[in-house]
Image (tube, grey):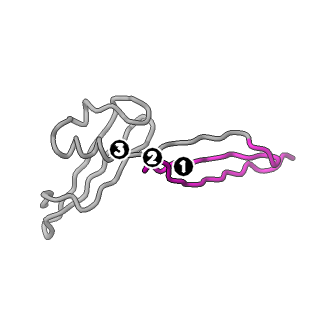
Amino acid sequence: MAEALLVDMSLSVSDGAVIATITAKRDGKNRATEKTSLAAKWPALAREILRGETAAADAACPDCGAHAVTCREVGRPDSPTGYAEAQCEDCGHGIYVVRVPGLEG
């Protein structure tokens, strides 16, 4: 019986970007390694959508390039702030932004 597949994830910072390194190991050997930059690409896109500079339907996903980004803004009646989330329906990457001003319920 083969040894179980182990997944190791580490985070590091390089030039202001957070880098997630995910390594899959089996039988004590690295089988696959993927590095993903979690740089300011999603925050920048969310800012453009929230400011009305880019429509979510026209936005390209910063990770996979698909035009499948959806955005949801939620306000509360008892608060001057709310939250927003943007996500790519193709690859599943996205961002959740809290304390967005001007989203009264």
Is residue 18 magenta-colored? yes
Q: Are marks 2 and 3 in contact (CB under 8 Å)?
A: yes
Q: Disc 3 marks which residue?
A: 42
Mark 3 vs mark 1, CA separation in Å: 15 Å
Q: Which residue is mark 1?
A: 20
Q: Tag 1, which secondary structure?
A: strand
Label drawn at residue 38: 2
Q: Earlier in the sequence, mark 1 or mark 2?
A: 1
Furthest-front residue in view? 15
Residue at the spot 25% in from the left edge and 58% down from the top edge:
83
Is 55 displayed left or right of 91 in the figure?
A: left
Q: From the viewer's side, name the closer residue of 65 and 40.
A: 40
Q: SS at mark 2?
A: loop
Question: Which portion, as a residue range, is magenta?
Answer: 1-30
Q: Residue 1: x, y in percent?
A: 87, 47
Q: Do residues under tags 1 and 2 come within 8 Å of each other at their CB atoms?
A: yes
At label 3, which amino acid type do we have?
Trp
Within 10 Å of disc 3 (Cα), the crowding (few <14, some 14-19, many 20+) is: some
Q: Quadrant of residue 104?
A: bottom left
- Is 24 magenta? The answer is yes
The disc labelled 2 sits on which kind of residue? Leu
Q: Is residue 70 above or below residue 82?
A: above
